[in-house]
Amino acid sequence: MSVPRSRASRRRLTLATVGLLLFCAFVAFAKDVKTAANHSSGPLTKINENFGGIANGLIRSENSLDQQFHFLLTHGATMSRVQLASRLVVMSAEVKAIEVTSRYLVQPTIVGDLNTRLRAITDERTQAWRGIIHNLEADLQLPFTATSNTVNPASVLQSSSTAWNQIRRQLRNDPGHVVLHATTNSTANYLRVAGFSNLTQ
């Protein structure tokens, strides 16, 4: 013999059923959203990854140049004028190569205008590198391979590096989860303490 359900029991059963249906609908909706997001983020993932490849290649070149300048400033006193001139010619060519590579950052637009901001920072830094080369060639009375209007290259390198390192993590949580390298500051740190004295005295 069945026992009639109370009104409260029927209400609880109804609410539980409705709650279960709503939960199932939410799970289905979330799955659809996730699937759609995966499909729509595919092209964006590729764009971010391509940008990351160019940007990181650019930064690796700059960091290599930073180490070369630092070595030249700290060990250049032991080199002949021919060796110094030769190194400066090579480094000037590397600066030019960085400038050419940075042109590929124009399109497509990356979230937060990261591509245009990196190109602007790179332009500042290449001018600073040219300024260092020009100062060394002038002080050592070597043939000029670079010209620059940068008055204080060390300060420009330091400020531009700080600016880049403040924004370079923006793509970590975006499609592709791109990790962008930091810039190094060996040359700027050395110049702020010793200037060109070790090489030109």
Image (cartoon, helix red, strand yellow):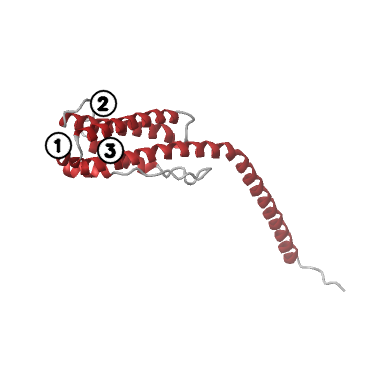
In the rendered structure, find residue 173 and report the number of the disc placed on it: none
Residue on which the image places disc 1: 200
Helix or strand or loop: what does disc 1 sit on? helix
Disc 1 marks a residue whose amino acid type is: Thr
The answer to whether residue 128 shows anywhere in this view is: no
Disc 3 marks a residue whose amino acid type is: Leu
Crowding around mark 3 (Cα neighbors within 10 Å: few <14, some 14 to 19, many 20+) is many
Q: Disc count in the image?
A: 3
Please tell me which of labels 3 and 1 falls first in the chain.
3
Q: Say left or right for 67 vs 37.
A: left
> Camera-side residue: 187 or 162?
187
Residue on which the image places disc 2: 145
Crowding around mark 1 (Cα neighbors within 10 Å: few <14, some 14 to 19, many 20+) is some
Mark 2 or 3: the one toward you = 2
- Please say if the residues under marks 2 and 1 sit with CB atoms less than 8 Å apart: no
Which residue is farthest left?
201
Helix or strand or loop: what does disc 3 sit on? helix
The answer to whether residue 75 shows anywhere in this view is: yes
Q: CA distance from mark 2 to mark 1?
A: 18 Å
The image quadrant of residue 126 is: top left
Residue on which the image places disc 3: 157
The image quadrant of residue 150 is: top left
Helix or strand or loop: what does disc 2 sit on? loop
The image quadrant of residue 194 is: top left
Q: Is residue 57 shown above or below 93?
A: below
Image position, residue 159 (x, y; %): 28, 39
* Residue shown at 68% from the left, 57% from the top: 19
Disc 2 marks a residue whose amino acid type is: Thr
Which residue is farthest right?
1
- Please say if the residues under marks 2 and 3 sit with CB atoms less than 8 Å apart: no
Image position, residue 54 (x, y; %): 45, 36
